Amino acid sequence: MAQPALRTDFAERLARRGDEVEDVRGLLLAHADPAAGPAEMAWLVAQAVAVACLGDDHLWQDLRLAHRGELGALLRHWFPSLVALNTGDMKWKKFFYRQLCQQAEILICKSPSCAVCSDHALCFESAEDAAASPPLLSVDRGRSVHPH
């Protein structure tokens, strides 16, 4: 299997939007599970996820994972309490930024309820998306989760 092309545009984005990376990384680390692994690894995973949030594709694609299920497994392993808050299966980038906006008491959504919002399909995984992605992976707490 060929390796995906190396992204070169993230350094420029990081220079312009480093504060966003800090905010997303902070959100993730606030929910880090100490039993998942060393704090340094949690920081590295949070940093990688936060930088990938600057990408234009789905987060799992920007992280070069095979499917959304791999991202779910990674997040559940390192940040389970944050994953538990995503009860509606909101797309991860949208979910992270919505969490940050709620913390800052900033209303960015068009509607007070996701269920009646005209952008619902943009924020949540559709049945077609779910069918295209394998089921979410379970993670054994005794081992690390790494992309292939």
Image: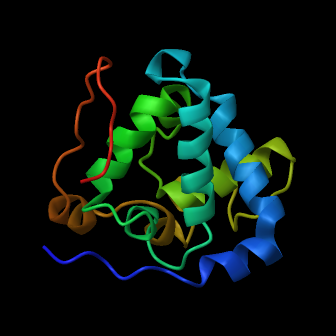
Residue at the image point whose x is 43% and y is 79% from the top: 6
Query: In the figure, residue 108 lies in which quadrant?
Result: bottom right
Residue at the image point whose x is 27% and y is 29% from the top: 139
- Depth order, front residue of 34/119: 34
- Residue 68 lies, in percent from the top left, at 31, 57
- Residue 35 lies, in percent from the top left, at 48, 15
Q: Which quadrant is home to the C terminus?
A: bottom left
Count of numbered labels shown in the rendering? 0
Depicted 20 relative to depicted 24: above or below:
below
Residue at the image point whose x is 44% and y is 60% from the top: 124
- 111 vs 34, left or right, is right
- 70 vs 52, left or right, is left
Residue at the image point whose x is 50% and y is 64% from the top: 123
Q: Which quadrant is home to the N terminus?
A: bottom left
- Depth order, front residue of 134/106: 134
- Residue 52 lies, in percent from the top left, at 55, 64
Depicted 47 relative to depicted 122: above or below:
above
Confirm whether residue 148 shows in the render. Answer: yes
- 9 vs 74, left or right, is right
Colouring convention used in this rendered image of the protein: rainbow
- Residue 85 lies, in percent from the top left, at 54, 34
Confirm whether residue 95 shows in the render. Answer: no
